[in-house]
Amino acid sequence: MQKIFLVISMSSLCLAIIWPWLKKLPIGSLPGDINIKTGNFQFYFPLSTMILFSIILSSILWFLKK
């Protein structure tokens, strides 16, 4: 259990460190992401981005499991 918390906290720390560079990537605006703007209402659902991250994360975890 302690290993899991350590991995989660180290991952969060690494993500926080590289976040300024990740914000500049056009990953959050892929084709297939739903973005609705009407008046003063905005709805954003990153469907394609979530699928892409899911595939990448699943592949990484699959390779680490082997």
Image (cartoon, rainbow, N blue to C red):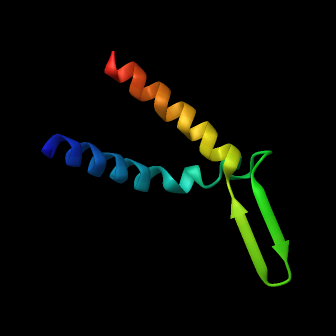
In the rendered image, the vertical position of residue 22 relative to residue 59, given as above or below: below
Closer-to-camera residue (51/22) = 51
Residue at the (49%, 25%) spot, across then down: 59
Q: Position of residue 7 (x, y in %)?
A: 26, 43
Q: Residue at x 40, y 19 (%)?
A: 63
Q: Residue at x 35, y 46 (%)?
A: 11
Report which quarter residue 43 is drawn in: bottom right
Kindly give the residue lying farthest to the left in the view shown.
2
The N terminus - image quarter: top left
**Residue 37, image quadrant:** bottom right
x and y, in percent, of residue 35 in the image: 78, 62
* Residue 4 x %, y %: 22, 43
Left or right, residue 9 beside residue 60: left
Considering the image in quadrants, where does the C terminus appear? top left
Residue farthest to the bottom? 40
Give the vertical position of 56 relative to 10 (above or below).
Answer: above
* Extreme residue toward the top, this view: 66
| Residue furthest right as drawn | 39
Position of residue 39 in the picture relative to residue 16 (left or right): right
Q: Is residue 45 above or below residue 15?
A: below
Count of number-bearing discs: 0
Q: Horizontal placement of 10 versus 27: left or right?
A: left
